[in-house]
Amino acid sequence: MRTAVAAGRLTRAGRWVTVRVLINQIRFTALQAIGLVTFLAAILSFLVISQTVRQLGRVGATDLIGTVIVVAVIRELGPLLTALIVVSRSGTAIAAEMATNRVLGEVTALEAMGIDPYIYLVLPRMLGAIASVAALMIVFDAVALASGYFGAALSGMAFQRYTGIVLTTLSAKDVWLTLAKGLVFGGAVALFPSYHGLAVKAGPTEIPQAVTRGVVATIVAIFVSSAVFVVVAAG
Amino acid sequence: MKPSARARAKSGWLAQAYAYGREGAPPLVYAGIDLRDRPDHPDRRFDLSVLAGTTVVAIGDEDSGVGDLGSYALGLRQPIAGRVEVFGAPVGALPYYDLLMFRRRIGYHPVGDGLLQNLPLRDNVALPLRFASDHRLAEVDGRVGELMESFRLRAVAGLRPAQANEEDRRRAAIARAVALDPDLVVLEAPFDGLTGRAAQDLLDKASRRDDGSRRAVFVTAQDLVPSVRRLVDRVIKLVDGAAVEETP
């Protein structure tokens, strides 16, 4: 909430600098994580689909492969894994950076200059994390769908049949769910580490504790909100 | 409170900083401040007015409370008793965002230097201009260029604080404090570890406004070298929580 209020208070030059910091944040959070996300999406989807096709083939229910890949991989595991990757890379970095800013007196110096630390420190990281998590989820989904085909092909499924089953199962709801999860998970990835980082008071020994608290809180928030999404989407 | 004439002369975001306080009020007033947070304190209170265009230094031992005066002036902390007024505005009573806006009227050099470690010295100096004023980018760049030249920082502008020497860090921190050409500058232990000559130079630069007139400067320190005393209008020593006038 305070970050949203802060966004409305940006000065002209401040906006430009915030965009520059935002681009840097996206470069670190999204671009540098693409390799890892691609690798994990490919492996996960390949394993899940190749095993599932084999088991479903025994009972003649290979048409259910679309439901498995969309519900299990695209809708649930993809966003969760993507968010966890971003937390492990960027959430830790954000918490450590904020805690260091606090310990070195930089947050107080910003406030003394009349600069809202939420504008300068939190806002670009939050926007960057939201954009990055949403973008990485799309990358994850695309790679998972492609890799899923190779898993299905091992059990003899043709490309046209695979795409037909997947496209029939995919719906507009999956698109907005992905975007909504990108927004919520991305916000959590920036918010909790920032909060715990800025809450440091005593000194440098608190920095690792703040990082741990920030990451644990983010993971819990991601899993809880994922459950909330299931309830909302089912309603 | 209505904006003063000075506020009307300025525009945008910075003008809002001038919307608080009273026209003609002293830049900084401490009234009845309790600096000795102890059960046996001798019930002595600290009173001081820093008038426009003057340089006042408060000195005292580490446990005298002198180190708290700067943060009280900025409203970063509240004294347990007494009040602090800056340009007539009670800084302790302003809401958070109003206080943030108001602080843009005050230049501040915290103990150490308060520079952001991940920014080069040039970007540190540019910070208040970028985020606490409504200047255009080109105006910010021009102003930062002037400050880097004036504070002799051009050669080290690209260095991060950890790469620069103590004098350059201090120069950058004071350049940042005067970047918005404030009416009042509060400097906490600004000359520690500097030569008398460098300290003189920095105090002179901190006390001169862009139009050549003098601004109010309030310095807190544990001690003051004789060469700097010559540039100072008043020296106050904190003894048992109260102010004792010393000869500059």
Image (cartoon, rainbow, N blue to C red):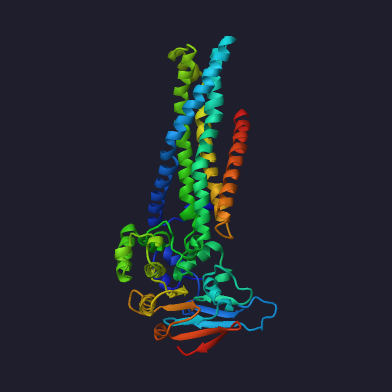
Q: Is residue A164 visible?
A: no
Residue B142 relative to residue B190: left or right: left
Q: How many marks?
A: 0
Q: In the rendering, at what x and y percent does residue B117 appear?
A: 43, 59
Q: Give the residue drawn at x 41%, y 81%.
A: B53
The relative height of residue A154 versus residue B63 in the rendered view (above or below) is: above
Q: Quadrant of residue B83?
A: bottom right
Q: Give the residue drawn at x 62%, y 28%.
A: A234
| Residue A120 vs residue B90, the one in the foreground | A120
Q: In the rendering, at what x and y percent does residue A94 appear?
A: 50, 49
Q: Give the residue drawn at x 45%, y 74%.
A: B192
The relative height of residue B244 versus residue A111 in the rendered view (above or below) is: below
Q: In the rendering, at what x and y percent does residue B159 appear?
A: 35, 60
The relative height of residue A59 versus residue A210 in the rendered view (above or below) is: above
Residue lying furthest right in this view?
A: B39
Q: In the rendering, at what x and y percent does residue A147 appear?
A: 46, 23
Q: Is residue A219 visible?
A: yes
| Residue A106 vs residue B30, the one in the foreground | A106
The relative height of residue B47 versus residue A231 in the rendered view (above or below) is: below
Quarter of the C terminus of chain B within the rendering: bottom left
| Residue B111 vs residue B185, the one in the foreground | B111
